[in-house]
Amino acid sequence: MPYFFILPLFVLYVAALGAAILCCRLFVPSSPLRSFLVGLLVWSSIGFVVATLAYVAVFVGVTVAYKHLSGNGASTVAGVGLALLVFVAPFASAAAGVGLGGAYGVWRVWKRGSGPENPA
């Protein structure tokens, strides 16, 4: 259910970065920033996908382990943990994936030296 909120926000994020890249393409003085925006868009998208896949793997692993360990008895602590895993972890995972992926993309462009000082 949280991905009903996360996915539209991610689509808006991608659209905003795409518009910014297009503006940098059309407005010549800002063209050196385009490489940063492209790196941010590509690597934050990759980070989002990887973080979502990792969340799904952890979610499936935890639910299978919970089913095997709990038997028929319900535990309040396990229920709260699963609720956090379902309702809080997707937001944290998506934010970490976009943030860390975007930071890596900007760092790659900066390291390559094609920033505002050295346009590619």
Image: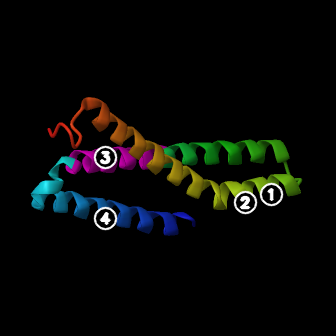
Q: Is residue 49 magenta?
A: yes
- Of labels 4 and 2, earlier in sequence is 4
Label 1, on which residue?
79
The mark that comes first in sequence, 2 or 3, is: 3
Residue appearing at x 15%, y 40% in the figure: 119
Q: Residue furthest front?
A: 117
Whole-number angstrom distance, CA of label 4 to CA of label 3: 13 Å
Residue 67 appears left or right of 8? right
Quadrant, the C terminus: top left
**How busy is the neighbourhood of tag 4: few (under 14 within 10 Å), some, or many (20 plus)?**
few
Specify whether residue 72 is in view: yes
Q: How many residues crowd mark 1 within 10 Å: few (<14), some (14–19), many (20+)?
A: few
Query: Magenta segment, principal secondary structure?
Result: helix
Q: Are marks 2 and 1 in contact (CB under 8 Å)?
A: yes
Q: Quick check: 30 left or right of 52?
A: left
Q: CA distance from mark 4 to mark 1?
A: 38 Å
State the mark number for residue 16.
4
Q: Is residue 65 magenta?
A: no
Between disc 2 and disc 3, the foreground one is 3
Element marked by disc 2: helix
Q: Amino acid at mark 1?
A: Gly
Which residues fall within the magenta stretch? 33-50
Gap between marks 3 and 1, in whole Å? 37 Å
Q: What whole-number distance in Å separates the C-alpha atoms at marks 2 and 1?
A: 6 Å
Is 96 displayed left or right of 117 in the figure? right
